[in-house]
Image (cartoon, helix red, strand yellow):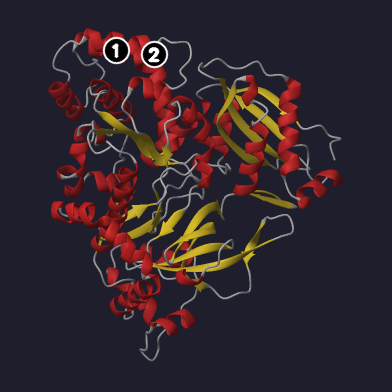
Amino acid sequence: MASEKEIKEIYENGMNILEDLTNNVQEIQEQVLEEILKSNAGTEYLSRFFPNGEADNQSFKTNVPIITYEDIKPYIDRIANGETSSILLAYRIIQFLLSTGTSGGQPKLIPMTAESFEKRMSDLLLSDLVTRKCFSGSDEGKSLYLYFIKPEMETPSGLKASFFTTFYFKTESFKNGLAKFFTSPIDTILCLDNKQSMFCQLLTGLLQRDEVVRFGSTFASVLARTIKFLEDYWRELCCKIRTGYISDWIIDPGCKNAMSLILTRPNPELADSIQQICEDKSWEGIIVKLWPKIKYIHCIITGSMSQYVSLLEFYGGGIPLVSPIYNSSESSFGINLKPLSKPFDVSYTFLPNTAYFEFLPVGKDGEGKTQETWTDDEPVDLANVKLGRYYEVVVTTLAGLYRYRVGDVLKVTGFRNKSPQFQFVERRNVVLSIDVDKTTEEDLSKAIMKAKLILEPLGIMLTTCSSYADTSLTPGRYVLFWELKMKGRNDLPKLDAKIMEQCCCIVEESFDFTYKSHRKGGAISALELRVVKHGTFDELMDFYVSKGVSVAQYKPPSCLKSEEAVKILNSGMVGKFFSPKTMF
């Protein structure tokens, strides 16, 4: 694990490290692959591809197939059930990481070693260094970061399995290093009750409001949930600050102990100040009003998180939104070297020392839609991707993943020295599908972005959305779920049928030729828009959390596959609208 000395070295020499990494991409990538093969070529998995024992870089690219999780899963399951990890990798597995599981079904088990964790830590620290250098004074205060954990699972082998955040916040690296820069005491982060944890973290953040210079979490969805929680509990939070006593329902021993050391006296002046801010009819800019020294909001806002951009811009009151890093359960990939980029312009510079990267060229059809399969071109390495081209990323790691398709489609937007910069486009396994048509996450997101523009002048915010393919009737149709609210209030807006139908039209008109032709021919029914009441998507999050997903790593599914999830959203429905049948 990264020591305090190593952390200090990165902060002192980080920019020099970045220059070296981005200038020597090809050499570092070849060294990374050589190291992986030197260590792991003799494993049961890899050795069958090198019958003569010649495991060099070129034979690796020639002989080892490109795979998905299902191909490697039998080996991971054998390790989880007690076989030695050496069947897959030479390094000792310290535990498994869980993928979020909300988009593609059940969570995956991804091996993690001490070495792979250190590479992740280096990327996190470099990213933090870059961000801080863009904002003067951000080193002088504390971070109000809302973080949460889930209970670890234990596999039959005795190896633990957890989300990365759960593992990370229990490490000595965090407890003895970075935790001192947070407003939240470590015991409030490690509390397994999300409600108690959220209340105590917000309370400590408000008590230290004049020291907070950074506000954030892992994903934008967590901050959206935080704002909703603040709307529901600000009066009780003010009461606790005013009286100096914690609420009776805070019964977690760690939280109670932590709060006893912070909530030491009544502070009616602070409570009055917070109350005056929260009583304002409009909550526009509420974040900067409550924490006036904040420099930026820090969370992932790309991919499925982009739906929260307008909400965070509204509540943030113009504070920059910084999307710091691109990673997954499988690997760390790159960092945002331009933290001040607009949310929809964010690109990530790949760092060549974290894993070995290859890229499958992805074609575009005449309407700019990514094709389902990659082109016949051979995979290219990190140093040879082309500006403006689309690729699906493939990763090889020291932790037992070899030519593994992550499922993310990226676009090359530029270069930092010789290292490519990529913009996230879509996840390949997130797709709306009816027999005759498939609509990707990217296409759906772009269509919704266009449609919501007609709501904004009316003071209506689209706070969260999802979708599913309804095939219960013939022909089937796509269904959108939208949660709407008035700006600055939780009031449900008055739903004008003509305007909502116009939203449906805009979405459908934004889809590709295939969809439109099938819609015109009657093979697809009119798109349906279901508006749900405020808080319905919180219930959806609670459902996935109850199934084992961590609040800190929750990604609202763009396309619902679970019947239970659809029922939850249907239960909150307050309006139903259809695209006109004669539009095409």
Q: From what the image shows, is residue 383 above or below residue 187?
A: below
- Residue positioned 21% across, 37% down in the render: 181
Q: Which residue is mark 2?
A: 278
SS for dot 1: helix
Q: How many marks?
A: 2
Q: From what the image shows, is residue 316 above or below residue 513?
A: above
- Residue positioned 49% across, 57% down in the render: 422
Q: Are marks 1 and 2 in contact (CB under 8 Å)?
A: yes
Decide if residue 105 is in sight here.
yes
Q: Residues within 10 Å of mark 2 (few under 14, many from 20)?
A: some
Decide if residue 160 is in sight here.
no
Quadrant, the N terminus? bottom left
Which percent across, then down, holds residue 58? 44, 83
Query: 41 or 235, which lies in front?
Result: 235
Q: From what the image shows, is residue 159 above or below residue 59?
A: above
Which percent across, then down, holds residue 461? 57, 25
Circle number at residue 238: 1
Please tell me in which quadrant of the rendered image residue 482 appears: top right
- Residue positioned 35% across, 89% down in the render: 53
Query: 207 or 196, which lies in front?
Result: 207
Q: Earlier in the sequence, mark 1 or mark 2?
A: 1
